[in-house]
Amino acid sequence: MSTPPLPIKRRKLSDEVKERILETIQRDALGPGDILPSERELMSLYGVGRPAIREAMQALQGSGLIEVRHGERPRVAEASMDGVLEQMNLSMKHILSHSGATLEQLKEARLTFETYLVGRAALERSEADLVTLREAMDQQRAARDIPAEFMKLDGRVHEVIAGIPGNPLYAAVSSAIFGWLAVFHVGSVRRPGLEDLTLEEHDIIFAAIRDRDARAAKEAMIRHLTRSNSLYDQSNARPDPTPGG
């Protein structure tokens, strides 16, 4: 006996309009900054009303694919990994807030990701990289009595390390993961000595990178993130957090 076909789902007009606009962008090879038809032109072209056009435009803008500015025709958006990750921000925080398993998986992924990158950083760092990393660490040390700023600069230290191999995607992903996890940090309740411990661990990581000792850098990062991962917990989710980690 054959399986009955699935019923055809009715699509919203705005979904159809969105697909048509994406087809236009791909067919005409439109790039960042290129102008798209106006609302009125799209209404005439597709034979639909203004609400469907606007809803489709809002969806495309929310996905970071187009830019819509008041009084101007829509344009194809500038491609940006930071922009893509920012679009994921609210969705990721929502998922993490309601899934302890996903939070644990993200912590594990961060550990694997940053352990790999710190090993690369130790082997590939330049003198200029060391200066940049030391500056970030000094800024964090200066903010040790300002919890929100200290945490934000903690994330900056990890972002600098991730950027040493020269692939900007690594730094962007490192920063995004840090920001997602920051919602669940117990740092909102001060723990005496925690800042000094973080700074000490960063110093050890820095020394290994300086000495081009990839093994020691990886071991130090594993110890650091294994310890810090315990500070991220679903029950400590904070609304509107200051990114950091």
Image (cartoon, grey):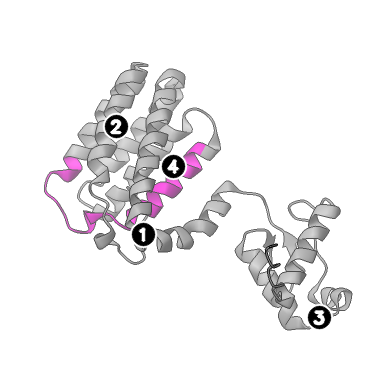
Where residue 13 appears, as percent x and y from the top left, is 74, 77
Q: Are marks 4 and 1 in contact (CB under 8 Å)?
A: no
Magenta stretch encompasses residue 96: no
The residue singled out by tag 2 in the image is 222
Q: CA distance from mark 4 to mark 1?
A: 21 Å
Magenta-drawn segment: 170-196
Q: Closer to us: mark 1 or mark 3?
A: 1
Predominant SS of the magenta segment: helix
Q: Secondary structure at mark 2?
A: helix
The residue that mark 1 highlights is: 99
Compared with 182, 15 (above or below) is: below
- Judging by the rendered image, the residue that carries numbered circle 4 is 174
Q: Is residue 194 magenta?
A: yes
Q: From the image, state whether disc 4 or disc 2 is nearer to you.
A: 2
**Left or right for 230, reference 87:** left
- Identified by mark 1, the residue type is Ser
* Visible residue check, residue 118: yes
**Disc with the residue nearer the chain's start (4 vs 1):** 1
Earlier-in-chain disc, 4 versus 3: 3
Q: Position of residue 1 (x, y in %)?
A: 68, 62
Identify whether 76 is placed above or below 13: above
Earlier sequence position, callout 1 versus callout 3 = 3
Identity, as a three-letter code, of the amino acid under mark 4: Ser
Q: Earlier in the sequence, mark 2 or mark 3?
A: 3
- Does dot 1 land on a helix, a strand or a loop? loop
Q: Secondary structure at mark 3?
A: loop
Query: What whole-number distance in Å separates the C-alpha atoms at marks 1 and 3?
Result: 40 Å
Between label 4 and label 1, give the one nearer the viewer: 1
Residue 48, numbered circle = 3
Residue furthest left as drawn: 192
